[in-house]
Amino acid sequence: MTKSSIRQIPIIRVKDGEIEETIDALAIEEPLEIRLEYTLNGNIMVQNVSVTMRTPGNDAELAAGFLFAEGIVKNINDITNINYCFIACAENKENVIQVKLNEGVIPNLQNTERNFYTTSSCGVCGKGSINAIRTVGAFAQQKDDLAIDNELLYQLPEILKKHQQVFAETGGLHASALFNLNGELLMVREDVGRHNALDKLIGASLQKGLLPLNNHILLLSGRASFELVQKAVMADIKIIVAVGAPSSLAVELAAEFEITLAGFLRNRRFNIYTADHRILFPVHENSN
């Protein structure tokens, strides 16, 4: 994120009936249109696949992560480059990004009919049915022996808070953070849309060759919704911890894919909803 993600505006602040004129910082929210360019039967095809309301910054990661999480591309090798639409777009060219696929790569667009219009508050709005968003993951389900100490989880929100640069100034962004199993922060992405923040995180991981993320912890700054768990499934994330509450459908999906899902992580407490075997607690001997 950069300063271009923030807008300063004059406001009137009221406190205990007293008013003052001051300046406030707002997180910018603008539309981003994601277009695909690929070759089909010798013809160059350009197709709009998504419009999402997002905070500008890390747009290439957002586009890559979205396409991967939706199963439209399989890996980073499918993509030749990602650029803003400077030539074909006379207006709002920084709000249109075009993803060019390698020769011979045909995107999986069978679900694009479900209308990929999303808002900052809902990552699955416009999708026809729950079956349409149960995309097939790129990684085979395998047994694992992942285990983390419960004490490690208590530290994560404070570590994230120190690295939420735009949130610190605006108070208006969601964040997705990736930690290793030792609790070391690897990356943070922010956005007005919680699903966008995770797409940016997955896109960055895709570009860095980190996928699958099956040896990592995903921390969500807000609630854990179905679409966030679905994206985590695509990236093969096994442990998701949220500061807020999960939805019922998020819990069902996490259970289906044996993902450890915890919520309400705050003030040295959290709830475990699924796959509790990955979180370790000290063994207390009987006092008798």
Image (tube, helix red, strand yellow):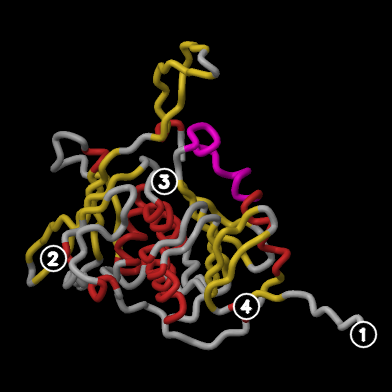
Residue 168 colored in magenta in the image: yes
- 198 and 246: which one is in front? 246
User: Which of the two discs, 1 and 3, sits closer to the camera?
Assistant: 1
On screen, 131 above or below 144?
above
Amino acid marked by disc 4: Arg
On screen, 91 above or below 226?
above
Amino acid marked by disc 1: Asn
Amino acid marked by disc 3: Asp
Could you tell me residue 224's position as x and y percent?
45, 61
- Closer to the chain start, of discs 1 and 4, is 4
Query: Is the C-beta separation of discs 3 and 2 under 8 Å?
Result: no
On screen, 98 above or below 279?
above
Q: Spatial distance from mark 1 to mark 4, Cα to Cα?
A: 29 Å
Could you tell me residue 62's position as x and y percent?
36, 53
Circle 3 sits in a helix, a strand or a loop, which is it? strand
User: Which of the two discs, 1 and 4, sits closer to the camera?
Assistant: 1
Q: Spatial distance from mark 3 to mark 4, Cα to Cα?
A: 29 Å
Residue 7 occupies quadrant:
top left
Magenta region = 159-171
Residue 288 numbered tag: 1
According to the picture, the residue beneath numbered tag 3 turns out to be: 191
- For the C terminus, give its image quadrant: bottom right
Q: Main secondary structure of the magenta part?
A: helix
- x 60%, y 61%: residue: 179
